[in-house]
Image: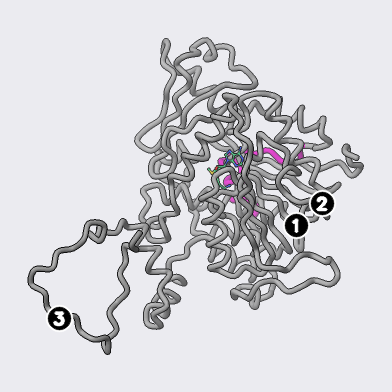
Amino acid sequence: MPSPIQPAIPSKAPRTRYQAKRVSLPGVVRVPLAKHELERFRFRSSNPLRAAWQEENRGRSDGWDEMFERYAAEADGDAEQSRVKGPASKDSRSGLRTSAASVHVLPRKPDLSSSASGASAVASHYNARPDAGLDARRDSPILPLRQFNNWVKSTIITKFGARNGRVLDLGAGKGGDLRKWHAKHVQEVVLVDIAAQSIEQAKARYDERKQTYHAEFFAFDAFGSAVSEHIPASILEPLFDNVSLQFCMHYAWDKVSKVNLMLENVAKYLKPGGIFIGTIPDADRLRRDLKALPNDELSFGNEYFRVSFDPTAPQKKETCPAFGHKYTFWLKDAIDECDEYVVDFEQFESLANQMGLRLIYRKTFEEVWLEVGEQRDSEAHRLLGAMRIPHPSTCSIPMQPALWEAASLYLAFAFEKAPTPAFG
Ligand SMILES: C[S@@+](CC[C@H](N)C(=O)[O-])C[C@H]1O[C@@H](n2cnc3c(N)ncnc32)[C@H](O)[C@@H]1O
């Protein structure tokens, strides 16, 4: 198939004779480029003038991750770390892998269960949303919400991430946390996502910025299958210092067997004393807003987001089951009516306890923001300023009310793995 972009004709190339009757062949008709394609091609350019522009522009527009990185480097008193370095070299002490990162998209036998079809619908949804590029992200109508979410993730990564550690990032998406782990000076990150195209984009993002740590990328269902089926044992050892599930665990919550499999994927590969962190919608808030709806209404939201509970199971409005309490979620410019499930936190904590994980942190995003506002000497407090999140002492909410309604739907958590492993 011909490329939509034709190479520029070099100035010394022989000129084609003018042919008045020439007609374009079908298939060479040029289709206008979409905004995200333009962005991609611009960043692929090898033109030195454009490369210079790209460097300059990147520095200006790269947003919160850059700020976080600079902030973390200052906090360490290590200005060198704020510069982008080449790929990690071999660490003889830890023996960690240093080869070029690779993407593993493994073929799987088709699983026709309804749970598996739900997972593949999630994969299709995220695959259909390519990374729109920096400019589009900056122009997003939900930019303050994205920025705030990144600040919360940065805050918990700063607080619980292990310096020089190994990280397993399940539901890693397009690699939105790559720079946050870089700023934490980790040694290695293993990224997994069910959406193969997202994980390819995460790899491209990693390659583009040449992180200082080694990374491996895998595309498979991390909530419907054991990680050991897909990731070689050599990569699962030594055990991870952190396992991170950001904005994704709620996709696992349709039945208890799936939740147990997901939690086993977390607990089994976390080292004793290691920390499991994540962000999920707050079940208390979802249920409170659902129950406050008049009569048989099952949907709430505003111009930025909408939560619509399953109309085929209206009785769940009263019973609020611990598993399989389905709703579809729409978030402007981000999520198009994707099926999610309420994560019953008491069940979550109880199942996690059975796997040797002890809850050490649970805060709604609002609580994270208010608490950090009071901790004047904390790293997260400085990060608030560095990432330009409004301070709780100057305003009651960090963004306009309708957007804050969506941002404040979430909570952050951390569990520590018991020093004596529950798995042999
Ligand atoms: C809202 S995105 C969050 C991405 C990333 N963690 C972040 O914070 O930027 C949710 C991600 O979870 C992934 N996901 C959902 N179900 C999954 C599953 N069963 N296994 C692996 N990834 C899954 C989706 O493909 C999507 O990339």
Residue at 45% in and 70% down: 58
Q: Amino acid at mark 2?
A: Leu
Q: Say which residue label 1 marks.
A: 166
Front position in the image: 277 or 87: 87
Quarter of the image with the N terminus in it: bottom left
Q: Amino acid at mark 1?
A: Arg
Q: CA distance from mark 3 to mark 1?
A: 61 Å
Spot occupied by residue 289 in the image (x, y as percentages of width and height): 49, 23
Residue at 54% in and 65% down: 67
Mark 1 surroundings: few (<14), some (14-19) or many (≥20) residues within 10 A = many
Q: Is residue 23 above or below residue 313?
A: below
Q: Say which residue label 2 marks.
A: 239
Verify CB contact (< 8 Å) between mark 1 and mark 2: yes
The part of the chain drawn in magenta is 359-375
Q: Say which residue label 3 marks.
A: 17
Mark 2 surroundings: few (<14), some (14-19) or many (≥20) residues within 10 A = some
Choose top left, top right, bottom left or bottom right for residue 107.
top right
Spot occupied by residue 288 in the image (x, y as percentages of width and height): 53, 22
Note whether residue 382 is visible. no
Q: Amino acid at mark 3?
A: Arg
Q: CA distance from mark 3 to mark 2?
A: 67 Å
Verify CB contact (< 8 Å) between mark 3 and mark 2: no
Choose top left, top right, bottom left or bottom right for residue 364.
top right
Mark 3 surroundings: few (<14), some (14-19) or many (≥20) residues within 10 A = few
